[in-house]
Image (cartoon, grey):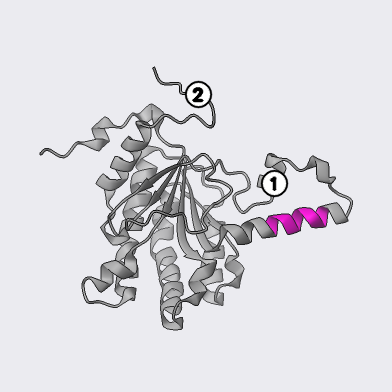
């Protein structure tokens, strides 16, 4: 059976504006090869690099990836330390190319709680790409959606206490402006790898009407063809946002 050429099949005028990805399966991919979990995390860097490159080439406006959750602190300390080092290594290796491709890097989450070298690397990368007008690339680090929502409520509560906001003035727009994703459109397409059918505390407010797509591939196996397939299948769906179908 011939594999479809998804690059030719996808319609450039119906691309998702914002793609979010839960990069799952690094550890299981490594375990199947009798290697440590850290081996899988390193292999996943290649998939991330290719995904960023492909999205930018296609003209995707926003890409958000889930790199490290607030729950990931429960992992073994040696794995956490490795992930923090890998983050710094990724930024050091990729920031020049990201900048040359006019990609604007942003971070979602409480990244200032990370180790000092990680914070410094992130700050330099954010500063270097701040004026870029190309694809916005969001990396969610030390991020959890419930934590994000609680922080938003606390912020709005403080404004009310200070007399700067009335409770009845809080609407969806007001609340969204208190989130890490302030100023970003909600994801159109959420991709999760490794065959898990759940969203794992990722962008819970923002994905109310997002199309979900699950890949059986582990993250280190995720490639350009799988990304294009996800986009093509997204284009086959009828997004109604609670209304009636628009398809004929």
For the image shown, how many numbered marks are present on the structure?
2
Q: Which mark is residue 244?
A: 2
Q: Is residue 164 rendered to the left or right of residue 200?
A: right
- Label 1's element? helix
| Residue 195 coordinates in the image, percent (x, y) | 32, 56
Relative to 212, is 192 above or below?
below
Relative to 21, is 44 above or below?
below
CA distance for labels 1 and 2 = 27 Å
Residue lying at 40% horizontally and 65% vertically, measured from the top left: 90
Q: Magenta residues: mostly which secondary structure?
A: helix
Q: Report the mark closest to the observer, 1 or 2.
A: 2
Q: Which residues are magenta?
A: 151-159
Residue lying at 12% horizontally and 38% vertically, measured from the top left: 2
Q: State the quadrant of the C terminus.
A: top left
Q: Is residue 244 rendered to the left or right of residue 237?
A: right
| Residue 12 coordinates in the image, percent (x, y) | 36, 30
Quarter of the rendering containing residue 31: bottom left
Residue lying at 50% horizontally and 76% vertically, measured from the top left: 74
- Label 1–label 2 contact, CB within 8 A: no
Q: Which mark is residue 166?
A: none
| Residue 30 coordinates in the image, percent (x, y) | 27, 71
Q: Which mark is residue 175?
A: 1
Of all residues shown, which one is farthest toward the right?
Answer: 163
Q: Is residue 175 rendered to the left or right of residue 208?
A: right
Residue lying at 81% horizontally and 57% vertically, measured from the top left: 158
Q: State the quadrant of the N terminus.
A: top left
- Mark 2 crowdedness (10 Å alpha carbons): few <14, some 14-19, many ≥20: few
């Amino acid at each position: 059976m011939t594999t479809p050429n998804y690059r030719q099949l996808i319609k450039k005028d119906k691309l998702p504006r914002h793609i979010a990805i839960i990069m799952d399966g690094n550890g299981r991919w490594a375990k199947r090869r009798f290697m440590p979990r850290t081996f899988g995390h390193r292999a996943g860097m290649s998939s991330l690099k290719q995904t960023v490159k492909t999205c930018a080439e296609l003209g995707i406006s926003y890409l958000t990836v889930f790199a490290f959750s607030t729950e990931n602190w429960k992992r073994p300390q040696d794995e956490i330390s490795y992930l923090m080092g890998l983050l710094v290594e990724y930024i050091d290796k990729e920031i020049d190319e990201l900048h040359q491709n006019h990609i604007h890097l942003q971070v979602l989450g409480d990244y200032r709680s990370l180790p000092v070298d990680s914070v410094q690397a992130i700050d330099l990368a954010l500063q270097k790409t701040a004026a870029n007008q190309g694809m916005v690339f969001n990396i969610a680090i030390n991020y959890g959606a419930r934590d994000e929502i609680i922080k938003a409520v606390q912020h709005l509560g403080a404004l009310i206490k200070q007399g700067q906001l009335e409770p009845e003035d809080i609407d969806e727009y007001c609340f969204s402006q208190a989130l890490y994703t302030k100023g970003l459109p909600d994801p159109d397409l959420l991709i999760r790898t490794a065959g898990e059918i759940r969203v794992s505390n990722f962008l819970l407010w923002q994905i109310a009407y997002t199309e979900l797509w699950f890949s059986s591939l582990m993250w280190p196996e995720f490639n350009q063809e799988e990304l294009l397939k996800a986009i093509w299948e997204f284009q086959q769906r009828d997004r109604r946002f609670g209304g009636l179908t628009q398809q004929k």
